[in-house]
Amino acid sequence: MTSRTFSLASFLLLAVLSLSARLSLAQTSADLQGAWKINTPDGSSHVLILSGDFFSWTIYGAKDGAFTSTKGGRWSKDGKKISLNYEFHTADKDKVGTTETIKLIQKGARIAAKGKGQPKGKWVDLDQGKTTPLNGAWLISGRKRNGETQPINTNRPRKTMKILSGTQFQWIAYNTETKQFFGTGGGSYSAEGGKYVENIGFFSRDNSRVGASLSFDFAVKEGDWIHSGKSSKGAPLYEVWSKRK
């Protein structure tokens, strides 16, 4: 075998190994997509939503849904470690804009987070592979008022985001510049036949809303989520949400 042939063979082998590693990493990250839950001995529920490149991690009372804290932003995976880049963090606002790395081990439909301060035990897969047209992270980009849809700048620091897995949803209002947090709510949802139904599992502004269900019309048009119906106070509601990239 000539040195030229050997070099070409080595190059091809390295290319194949590199591609295999990238595919393996992508597959591992894809396997983590969805919502995960763990109940801890102190009576809390932790729900972790990993949807696309975005995540939210919320803690609330397992029995009464009383809100404790939430954090989230972008995430990425490298081997057995995931990096969490925070856009909001109610327990410690100084962590907004920083990145935390934790070890995450997956075994089938369960995962475990390792490291100081991480909840002990195994997280259960809430979605079991289920998806809907609304999976992903969305920013509110328009509201209809007086019959006209008024655009909302999604690039400003003040954001209202919804993040959805196949069965779980959460909305969060926050400011990445001032590190302020304005409110959040979430729980389970369904999106079928043009009907979007939210079942509230926690709500930071009003714990009495836990257990309520809200029904809306929805459609995805040209990549935007059109959300309409009536608010919890009975007022007409029409919103446009744009997918985060």
Image: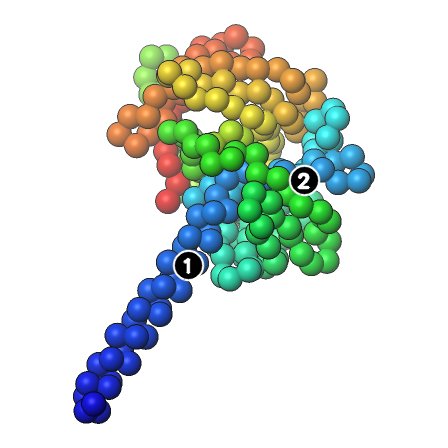
Pinpoint residue 195: horizontal percent, then vertical percent.
42, 15
Pinpoint residue 149: horizontal percent, then vertical percent.
33, 21
Q: Secondary structure at mark 2?
A: strand
Q: Secondary structure at mark 1?
A: helix
Closer-to-camera residue (131/140): 131
Pinpoint residue 26: horizontal percent, then vertical percent.
41, 55
How many numbered marks does the figure carry? 2
Residue bearing the label numbered 1: 24
Q: Are marks 1 and 2 in contact (CB under 8 Å)?
A: no
| Quadrant that contains the N terminus | bottom left
Closer-to-camera residue (157/216): 216
Q: Does residue 179 appear in this view?
A: no
Residue bearing the label numbered 2: 38
Closer-to-camera residue (225/33): 33
Pinpoint residue 86: horizontal percent, then vertical percent.
56, 50
Amino acid beneath label 1? Ser
- Residue extending farthest to the front is 1
Q: Does residue 106 appear in this view?
A: yes
The type of colouring in the image is rainbow
Would residue 31 appear left or right of 122 to someone viewing this image?
A: left
Give the residue drawn at x 24%, y 80%.
Answer: 9
Give the residue drawn at x 28%, y 81%.
Answer: 10
